Image (cartoon, grey):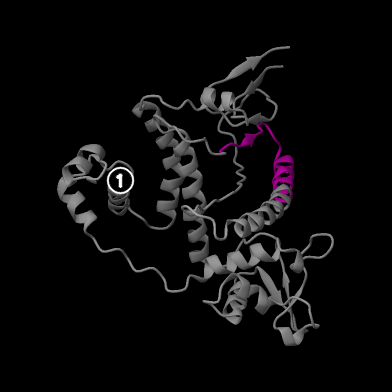
Amino acid sequence: MQTDITAKTASTAADSALCPGGGLPDPVLAEQALAEVLQPLARLMIDHGVQLPSLVDLLKKALVEQAELAYGLADKGSSDTRISLLTGVHRKDVKRLRHAPEPAAPASPIVPIASSVVARWISEPRFLHADQTPRPLARTPTRGNAGEPDFTTLVAEVSRDVGARAVLDELVRLGVVESREDGFVTLKSNSFVPKEGLSESFHFLGSNVGEHLAAAVHNLRPAQSEPFMLEQSAFSEDLSPVQADMLHKRARQLWTHALQQFLQSATVAWQRSEGAAGPRRRVRFGVYFHDKVQAVEAAPTPPLLAPRKTKRKTKP
């Protein structure tokens, strides 16, 4: 049997071998990767009526922003001409995009708050049973027993910008919680996975996919001097539909367990960060599962780690 071992390991040596820093830019390999990334993006555009001119303008704006943010000259920034040379965006477009007013952000984005409420609910011991499952919470302190946690207190610990009733209504609408007739609220899923609401789904598409891609791009930057970020996956081929579905269910179980452990650690990290000097950092830890029909027949292979830059082959 032949096995390919191709993903990064935790060791610095393996990371350096598979994602070498300090290399030269490689536009050919970058274009090949972009061609694959663009396939689901094209499907998204067609599904939701986004046509090429809109995407071109979005791409121009992103190129200008990144050139200005990451490639400005020390103490000088970047001129329109320099950004045009770096990106290929016409200088007139560069000038227009650099001075375009930013769209106003929503006053109280309820989706991030609702997500944070669920995250705290499944990670804070006060809101959990002894077996680490989320407790039903009284909607308000007066509906529960004295000294027991309630949903209003939970929301207040996350944010005081949005009322508990508004957060509850949104979570019920999205199918994440159930508001019972006895005055208690129960969590229907340990993950914030809205069953309704297109705007919420697009919010997480942008956040999750955007930061996943940002981690991969970070690891491939020429002259990379910072530590590599975790970015890997595993795959298995030649599965029957039944077995593929079984793996999907198993992946969800593993994610639920990992999510709870990560959020508990994140809560401790947040508490220890209060009052610490220096810039603030934001982290995101995620997972995905994708299942599709294989395009061509392939020789049976065992489960493999996702391919990176190099391959090692071993034979018995």
Q: Is residue 162 above or below residue 290?
A: below
In percent of width and height, residue 4 lies at 63, 22
Q: Is residue 77 left or right of residue 152?
A: left
Query: What residue is shown with label 1?
Result: 63
Q: Given the current orientation, which residue lies at the most extreme right position? A: 130
Quadrant for residue 298, please give it. top right
- Look at label 1 and name its amino acid: Leu
> Residue at the location (62% across, 42% down)?
291
Q: Quadrant of the N terminus?
A: top right
In percent of width and height, residue 104 lies at 34, 69
> Residue at the location (57% across, 23% down)?
13
Q: How many marks?
A: 1
Q: Is residue 186 left or right of residue 22?
A: right
Secondary structure beneath dot 1 equals: helix
Quadrant for residue 11, please give it. top right
Q: Is residue 160 above or below residue 290?
A: below
Is residue 233 one of those drawn in magenta?
Answer: yes
In percent of width and height, residue 61 lies at 29, 51
Q: Quadrant of the C terminus?
A: top right
Q: Is residue 15 above or below residue 232?
A: above
Q: Which residues are magenta?
A: 231-253
Q: Is residue 195 visible?
A: no
Is residue 244 one of those drawn in magenta?
Answer: yes
The residue carrying pointer 1 sits among few (fewer than 14), some (14 to 19) or many (20 or more) residues within 10 Å by Cα, namely some
Q: Given the current orientation, which residue lies at the most extreme bottom position? A: 142
Q: Is residue 264 left or right of residue 146?
A: left
In percent of width and height, residue 251 lies at 70, 46
> Residue at the location (74% across, 75% down)?
149
Q: Nearer the viewer, residue 216 or 266?
A: 266
